[in-house]
Each structure stands twice: as C-alpha cells, then as structure tokens.
Image (cartoon, rainbow, N blue to C red):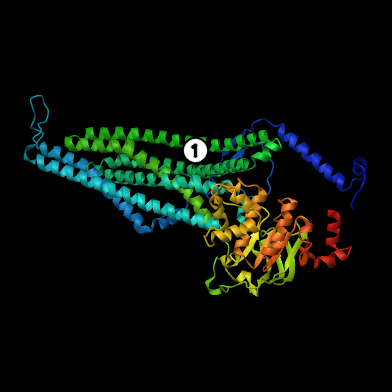
Amino acid sequence: MGEQGTHQELMESDGGYSKLIQTFVKKEEEEKKKEQRPKMRRLKSIRIKSPDQANGKFDFEVDDGDDEVDGKLIEEEQTGGSVVQLSTYAGYIHYMGGWGMALLMLLLAGVTVFCLVTTNACVAIWLRAAMPSNETMDGQGGAVLDLGEELGSFIILYVSTFTVALLFLLLMCYAFIRILLRASTRLHNALFQRIIRCPMSFFDTTPLGRILNRFSKDLDEVDILLPSCLQKFSLFFFAVLISLTVVGILIPWYYLILAVVLPLICMYTIFFRRGFCEMKFMEGITLSKLVAHLTATMQGLVTIRTFRKTDHFIRSFGYVLDKNTLVLELFQTTYRWVHVRMDLISAFSTGATAVLVVLLHDTVSPAFAGFILFTGINMCSGMVQSMVSFAMDAESCFVAVERMMEYLKVLEPEAPEIIESNRPPAAWPSEGKLKFENVQMRYRESLPLVLKGISMTIESKERIGIVGRTGSGKSTLGVALFRIVELAEGKIHIDGIDISSIGLKDLRSKLSIIPQDPVLFIGTVRYNLDPHNNYSDEELWSALAQSHIKDKISQLDGKLEAPVIENGENFSVGERQLICMARAILRNSKVLLLDEATAAIDTKTDSLIQQTIREAFKDCTMLIIAHRLNTVLDCDRILVMDDGKIGEFDKPDTLQADSSSMLSKMVAAAK
C-alpha cells in the first residue's frame, strides 16, 4: 500500500496521489483553453518561398497559428519534388507492358493525326487543281473554279483518307483503353499486395485516411483521368508537330513567328509546372488528413457524443477542410494564370500568321493560303494551349502514380509466406511443445524492449496461465509467437523447429488464437466459421454447441447462412467472442492462444467457456492470457509477467502457498 488518508491529507503529503490530481487538473485547464479558442480556426497565412537554389524545389509555409508539436508516433507525410521523377514514368511504362506498348500507342496517335491533317490537305490540293490560273476570272473579279473530270477522284481520295483516319482513331482508342487499363490494374494489384503484406508497425504509424486516399482519389485519377489526358495530349502533340512541319514547308518565314512564340510557351510551361506539381502533392496530403479525420470521427461517434466533444471535432474538421480548400484554390488559380498567358500568346501568333499570309499573297495560292490560315489559327489558338493543358493534367495524374509507387518503393513486406526450401512436415506440430530461448522483442527499432530475455519450456498439452499487470508483456508473447513483430534477439521453437526459419503461412496456419477483441467479417455465419469450406454442417453445429452459441444461431433467419454485417455489429461482443471460439474449435490446432478471451463475457458464460476449453482443447497446448485470475488458477502452470520479464513460473498451488509471491499478492488484491 503506497498511501492512505483523506483527500486533504494526501494532497498535503505531495505524494503519488497529489501528483495524479495535479496532472488531471492541468489537463482540464488545457482542455478549457482549447474550448475557449474561436469556433473555427483559420489559417493565418500561406507563403510560397522562392525555389531552393540547390534542388529547384518550391517551399510552402502554412501558418495556422498553432505551435503545438505532435508526437512522433505518426510521421508527417512529405511532399514529393517540384516535378514528377523520371523513375515514375519508367515504372508506369513497365506496368503498361514495356516500351513496346508505349511506342505502339505513340505510333497509332501519330498515324491518326497524320491522316486527319491529310484530309485537310486534300481539300487544299483539290481547290488548287480547280484553279489552274489566277487569270481565269469571272465577270466580278472572282476566280473561276473548274472542277472538271477530277471531281470524282478527289472525292474518293478525301473519303478514303477520312475513313482511314477514323479507323486508326478507333484502333488508337482501343489500344489506349486496353494498355492503360492494364497498367492501372497492375499498379493497383501491386500496391494492394504490398499493403496487405506490410508488418503491423506500418499500420501503427500510418493513418487510415492516408492509405484510403491512395486507393480512392489517387487510383481514380490513374483509372479515369490519366488515360484521357494521355490520349488527348498525344493527339494534340502530333497535331502541333505535323502542322508546324506542313506550314513551315509552305511558308518558311513562319518559323520566325515560332522563334518568338515557342520560347514564351516553354518558359511559362516550365515555370507553371514546378509549382503545379508541388501543389498537387500538397492537395493529396491535406486530403489524406481530411479522410483520416472523417474516418476516425465516424468510428468514434459514440465516444465523442458520450464525452460531449462534438463541437471540438466540428472545429477540427473545419480546420483540416480549410487546409485542403486553400490548396485547391491555389491549384485552380495557378491553372487560370497560365491559361491567360497562353491566350495572349495565341492571339499574337494568330495575328502574326494572318499578316504573314497577306504579305506573301503573291507566292502562295489562295487554296494553300486558306489551308495555312486554318491550320495556323487552329494550332495557335487551340492546339498548343490544349497540348500544354493536357500535358499538365497528365503530369498531375502522375503525381498520384508517384504517391502510389512511393509505397511500393518504401514499404518493406513481412517475411515470405512460404519458404520452399524449408517447409515443416505436413503433420507439424504433432505435440505442441514450445521453447523460448532468450526472447527479446521491441515493436519498432526506436522503441525500448518489451520482452527482455524470456526463456522457458512449455510441454505438450500443457495449459499455461499468463498473468501480470497492464504493460507487463502478456499479449506481446502472442505477438512474438505469431511473428506479428519479428524478434530482436532469441528464438522460439515449436516441436524443435525454429519458427523464424519457416514461412509465415506455414506458421500461422498451424496456430489458433481467440483474441481479446473478437473479429467477424462481412458475409455469413458459415463464412466466418469456415471461409474455405473445409468442414461439414455437422462439424459446424458441433463447434457452435461446444461454444454455447448454437441456440442463438439456430434462431436466426437462414441459420448458418444468416448475414453478418461489418465488424459483426449485429451480434453482441460476447456472442462474437463465442463465434470466434467456435472457429478455433474447428481448426483443432495443437497450439492455442487465448488473449483475455473471456474479458467481455459475463461470469456465468465465462464458467461455461472454461469448461469448454478444458474439454474441446484438452489435446493441445494452451497459452491463456488472463483478465480474471480465477480463470487460470486451474491451469497446469502460471506465468507471472513483470516488466517484460518472467516474474514467476510455477504451479498455481506452489505459488499461492508462498504468501510473498507475486501471484499470491495479486489474488489477495482481487478479493
């Protein structure tokens, strides 16, 4: 007993009780200060620094008036570079199927545009052929068009060229859809497999919204926007390239206009591109925080209302929404900025082209003059601006690709599921004997050890009760056994096989666990008991009967086919735990871990479960992490954990016979 006395006496003694109260009061005062802040926190300012001379990267500073420093459990998501890396484009081409597929797409786009430009050229040639001499004039001074016998051949040529262009356009659309859809599918599958295979430390330090954003908004851009932007950019790029070539051949002086226009376009495009990509990264980061906040709020809605923190979460939502909206506003503003300048350049180029055609009217036929004006005006007023616009849109979509590929590069997967060269026997484990040798474990590299040199041997079919205070390392033993986190040092053997030497699937498929928080999946009762359809209905009902949940399931509509909603919310916590126990009974593993499995069940049901455990799992080795001491007092031996070490490990009668033992003190305190 640490302290005893009245409230006033304990406060005057300045002991542990006094410090606890002072901490609570201080926390309450901090909360009151937060509540007294304005109803909606606003961002004070956002500044865009000049590019860093070293890396050419723009630096954004967001001042929200809040200087509090968050903890280091969850690292802040970093923006990418000022431009998309070349490795991102190379990686996407790899998922497309290689450079051959990329060249095929470019070839089809180029041929399609060439055929479309050829149709316009056919009209110009047709008109020139119909106007053989400038001296053939009508009475009003106009040129006389003599279509003559060549009318039919020109019509056939025009229709044939247009038909070929249409066929190539359809073929190009089909190729773009198939190839780019395959790329997005492969990228999604690779990312999904990498996320699924990540260790638990990744999910501990990564907000759910950050992951969801990759599979929602980022993937939506890769699936829908990117193919459209790439296709349109390819068409406009070849249209500009071929138009420049044709017009330059007809009027070489046109290159003087291009010598002025193209540097301006390139300058504005490069300047715009650097800030454009950076803001796209920021938009993705702020959206991740918004999704994470919404997800956490919806999951904790009951708790939020219980503690009357609704206003606080509304203000927090407004804060993260303001951040995201601010970046979107900057994003759209810079878009309009570059479009205005492109319009001015296009107006200058169009006027200069018209003046050039007028000045050179003696050397250019009226038919080709019309063709040049039509092509030049379209190119300057529409095609170049559209090409730049779709190029920027495509690059913004590649920001999403880079964010997805970032996970593929950075995330380290768990150990292999199967190691073909070292697979355990099919009947392993046949006995269920466990041996811990100097087991040390930490949850992450920068954290202290939570298991500190655990060494013990558990015999076959032995029932071990594991007790200890909160944070003593009870549940961590199960984490180490299932290799949820790899050991920092030491080994664990099951029937003489080092579990670190075999694949995770071979290990985990041979072990069973009944967790403290029962987990049910969307589907049916049958699916949650037997997802692989390995057992008959009789075996399923027998397992349900042994776990004392058969009567409940038999009363449901559909019985074994009764629906289970998300997280099993249509069942109580106790019923979910009983279904999980039935699932473990079906597996009939030689090693079973019960992680405070009866903590959420009433005392009467708990006693029935204990009886079931003794009967259904009598042939397997059991590790029972206890919340109630009376549930493990009938175990063969009891392991008392103390600060990550073995405090005591002996038979319960022996430990209770010693009044100074840790178990005796815990039992006495529980009475």
Asked whether 382 or 570 is in front, the reply is: 570
Q: Is residue 87 left or right of residue 570?
A: left
- Quadrant housing residue 545: bottom right
Reply above or below: 205 against 309: below
Asked whether 373 or 187 is in front, the reply is: 187
The picture places residue 131, in percent across and down from the top left corner, at: 11, 36
The picture places residue 409, in percent across and down from the top left corner, at: 52, 57
Q: Is residue 362 visible?
A: no
- Quadrant housing residue 484: bottom right
- At 60% from the left and 34% from the top, the residue drawn is 318
Farthest residue, direction top: 140
Amino acid type at circle 1 is Phe
Q: Secondary structure at mark 1?
A: helix
Q: Is residue 322 left or right of residue 166?
A: right
Q: Is residue 540 visible?
A: yes
Q: Is residue 198 left or right of residue 333?
A: right
Which residue is labeled 1 in the image?
A: 331
Q: How many marks?
A: 1
- At 34% from the left and 35% from the top, the residue drawn is 346
- At 66% from the left and 30% from the top, the residue drawn is 39
Reply above or below: 99 against 113: below
The picture places residue 236, in percent across and down from the top left corner, at: 33, 43
Asked whether 411 or 610 is in front, the reply is: 610
Reply above or below: 285 against 367: below
Pointer 1 local density, CA inside 10 Å: few below 14, some 14–19, many at least 20: some
The picture places residue 432, in percent across and down from the top left corner, at: 66, 71
Asked whether 200 or 434 is in front, the reply is: 434
Q: Is residue 78 left or right of residue 240?
A: right
